[in-house]
Every structure is written in structure tokens, then in C-alpha cells.
Amino acid sequence: MDVVVPFRGSPAELEELRARLARLELREGDSMLVVDNTAGRGSSDVPVPVMAATEHATPGYARNRGAERGGADWLLFIDADVVPSPDLLDRYFEPQPAEDTAILAGGVRDEPVGAEAGPVARYAYISNAMSQDNTLSYGPKFGFPQTANAALRRAAFEAVGGFREDIRAGEDADLSFRLRDAGWKVERRERAAVVHLSRQTVRALIAQRMRHGAAGAWLGREYPGGFPARRRPGLVWWGLRTATRELVAAARNRDRDAALVAVFEPLEQISYEFGRSLRNERPRRS
């Protein structure tokens, strides 16, 4: 299995990522590569090499360049903000996938934090914000695994042309739909899990959801019938009413977690909807 991790961030964050990835247990024929999509700090250091891929700043571009460097039958894509278990690769093949399976959806668990933690991180944990259930629940036609942690059969991946490189987000959904249309299947591998390091600020949460909204609008145009828009005025009014009602109930019961859900759940949905007006395409620089 070839492990490919796209990265954007500072030198310190890069070294933290490499330290986390060094815990992964690799066997003969496995490889691991961080693809630096930011500043071109390429390195061939062992045990976690880094290659530069700065020509086009999208995760799809970084993942495709990393995939090209390997030759294993399976590709494992994980995000840079997750912590993998050391035996992650072995868990993906318990049991062996069927011959018509192209995607193995690994588990994504939000960083476990206590009730005293910051509000954004605590909300992510109690709401299972990054669970694969959230995107697979869109149903057989529009459900998809997130490539925060997913393995792909190389032959299928290459047959459909890999990831779209001209979009900022939603490339995992787009790839899943193309694989589905080509007759490939998805299997769950919840025990092959990573822990997602939660965002810590409201600003980061809103930015994430707006980026998802831009991806949702783009996917809705590419794949009609999925990811429909909601009326913004009605959504904002719903959010205000819901937050007020649930906050009153949470205060009455002295339930901090319920108060966090009351505030952040409407905020997420409103941010997502307003994000739909943002551009998801990122054309190559000439």
C-alpha cells in the first residue's frame, strides 16, 4: 500500500505531521509520502519523505502527484490533520476486500476532549463532526467516503483518471461518483481508524463549512439532484429560533454540551449555505 498525505502549512506543522506518520507500521512493498502543496520544502529524509507539489494548490493535485510516485496495488489517502493508529494498514485488510471494491472507507473519529475543552473542539467531539456516516448517509446515489481516511484500489483509481485537480474541495465525492458509475463498490473499514485533530476556533469552523458549501454547490451542478440549496432567509430565521429555544433549555438544565449544539449546529448549516456562493474552481496558473 502507498500512503499519500497532502499537506499545506508551516515548517513546524510539517515536522509534527512527519512525527505522527512515523508511527505507522509499514511492511515490504509499502511506502509513505507527504506531498507539500505549499512552499516546496522537498526532502528525501527517512522514514517520512516529503515531495514538493506547488505548481497547483489543490488537494487533488497533491494526491495525484503522490500517487504517481508509487506502484502498490492500493493507495491510502489520509489528511494531514489526523493521527493514524500504528496498525492502520493491516486493519484495512481485515477482511480482504471484494474484487469489485474500489474504495475502503476507513474510520474517522473526532479528537476526544473533555467537557472543560474549548467550545469548538468539544462540539466536534460530541457531534461526531468528521464521521464517515455524515457523508455516506447521503444514500446510494450521493453518499461518499471522505478521503481524510480512505484506501483506493490503484487500478480503479487510474482507470477513472484520479482526482479532479481544478477544485478546492469535493474531489473525494467527485471521484467516488465516477468510480460508482464505472461499476465499483465501497466497503466500510471502521476499525481502520484515524483521530481527526479538531479545529479550535469559530473562525476555522466557519471557514471549513463555507468551503464545504462551495464544494456542495459545485457537486450539485456536476451531479444534478444532489446537494440542493436551501433558502437563506428561512435558514437564518430557523437558526435564530432554534438557537434561542435550545439555549434556554440548556441553561435551564445547566447542560454546556446542549448549549454548544444549540449555537454551533445552526451556525454550521448557515455557513455551509452561504459558502455555496463561493467559487470552488481553482484554475491552473498560466
Image (tube, helix red, strand yellow):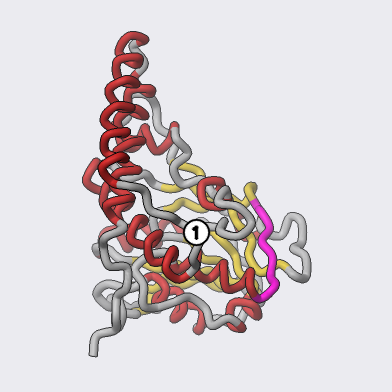
Asked if residue 225 lies left or right of residue 251, the reply is right
Can you say which quadrant of the picture contains the C terminus? bottom left
Asked if residue 112 lies left or right of residue 13, the reply is right
Quarter of the image where one finds residue 145: bottom right
- SS class, disc 1: loop
| 39 lies above or below 264 | below
- Say whether residue 46 is visible: no
Residue in the picture at 58% in, 81% down: 160
Question: Residue lying furthest top in this view?
Answer: 252
Can you say which quadrant of the picture contains the N terminus? bottom right
Q: How many marks?
A: 1
In the image, residue 259 lies at what x, y percent? 32, 23
Q: Main secondary structure of the magenta part?
A: strand
Quarter of the image where one finds residue 13: bottom left
Q: Which residues are magenta?
A: 182-189
Residue in the picture at 30% in, 15% down: 248
Q: Is residue 187 magenta?
A: yes
Asked if residue 63 lies left or right of residue 205, the reply is right
**Residue marked by disc 1:** 226
Q: In terms of depth relative to the viewer, which is nearer, 227 or 40?
A: 227
- Say whether residue 245 is visible: yes
Residue in the picture at 66% in, 69% down: 102
Asked if residue 177 lies left or right of residue 203, the reply is right
Question: Residue lying furthest bottom in this view?
Answer: 286
| 218 lies above or below 19 | below
In the image, residue 46 lies at what x, y percent? 45, 72
Q: Is residue 65 magenta?
A: no
Q: In terms of depth relative to the viewer, which is nearer, 244 or 174?
A: 244
Quarter of the image where one finds residue 121: top left
In the image, residue 100 lies at what x, y percent? 75, 70
Q: For the residue marked with disc 1, what is the amino acid?
A: Gly
